Image (spheres, coloured by chain):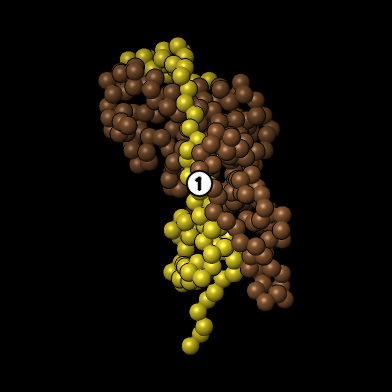
Amino acid sequence: MSSPRTITCQELTEVLTDYLEGVMPLEERAAFEAHLAICDGCVHYVTQMRQTIASARALQPEHVEATAPDDLLEAFRAWQRGDPVPEP
Amino acid sequence: MRSDEETLAALRRGDERVFVELVEQHHALMLRVASRYVRNPAVAEEVVQETWLGVLNGLRRFEGRASLKTWIFRILTNRAITRAQREGRAVPFSSLGDPGPDEPAVDPDRFRPEGDRWPGGWKCFPDPLPEDRLLERETLALIDSAIAELPDRQHLVITMRDVEGWSADEVCHALRISEANQRVLLHRARSKVRRCLEAYLDPAPALT
């Protein structure tokens, strides 16, 4: 019987995104989770990464107040009438 | 939030308010994407403007296989690439599949060396970041600037995925990159932002 795969802390930090994205193959995921079960340092590392993602999400997606410039609205009206929309 | 079907129906009815909302909803991100292809802000504005004209021209043929959003951004990247090439600029996503040189997620010095009893293990465990400081204005400003300083492709992927909340599929389609490539870029971007965040909120472990 072959021994189960194991990974180091350093390796874990390199495959974390695969894990979080849900694309890790089953066997690798088992090794990943087995490592987490015994390593507080890596549990904290994963927590840090989740915190990083959550904070990025808390940035306000940019929104612009400006209304569509007149020529864009003009183009929309032309399109609506079935006229060709001039493109450069 | 309106569904794509509702938006399309409203546009076909000639609802200008819906059109203006659509433009406003995407304008900032479109400009940000365009600026990573063509450096000149005025040219980026033009690319966005041209994109909307292209969107109008293509709208009646839009089949809804992709979402309206990713379809619009695909037109955008198409225009931006053409424009950048015309101006002789290197285009961030033109070399398909190459995510650039390898870079470690964590400083290798933080791990025990070969020959140690636990090679590749932490020398000193990281701690969870202080939850109460994560959403402070200064912290968010730091994250914002860390993201802004990322290389173009990493910048675009993390902005679309984590800040704007797009799915991996949507980003791949809009930016014309493979899933694997998207993941590598996301990994590097997130790892770098995490490093900045840790250095700011918990500077001790990095020093040991």
Can you give x and y, in whole percent of width and height, for residue A74 in the image?
A: 41, 12
Residue at x-position 61% and y-position 45%: B201
B58 relative to B48 in the view: left or right: left
Residue at 46% of width from left, 55% of height from top?
A: A21
Q: Is residue B186 above or below residue B120?
A: above
Q: Residues within 10 Å of mark 1 (few under 14, many from 20)?
A: few
User: Could you tell me which residue is drawn at 44 percent across and 42 percent down?
Assistant: B166
Residue B119: where, in percent of width, then height?
67, 72
Please provide percent x and percent y for residue B177.
52, 47
Quarter of the figure with residue B124? bottom right
The chain assigned the colour brown in the figure is B
Residue B202 drawn above or below residue B126: above
Q: Disc 1 designates what residue?
A: B131
Residue A18 placement, left or right of B93: left
Circle 1 marks a residue in which chain?
B
For this rendering, which residue is in front, A12 or B29? A12
Nearer to us in this view, B171 or B190: B190
Q: Nearer the viewer, residue B124 or B159?
A: B124
Chain A display color: yellow
Residue B52 visible = no
Q: Is residue A23 visible?
A: yes
Give the image location of residue B145, x and y in percent.
62, 36
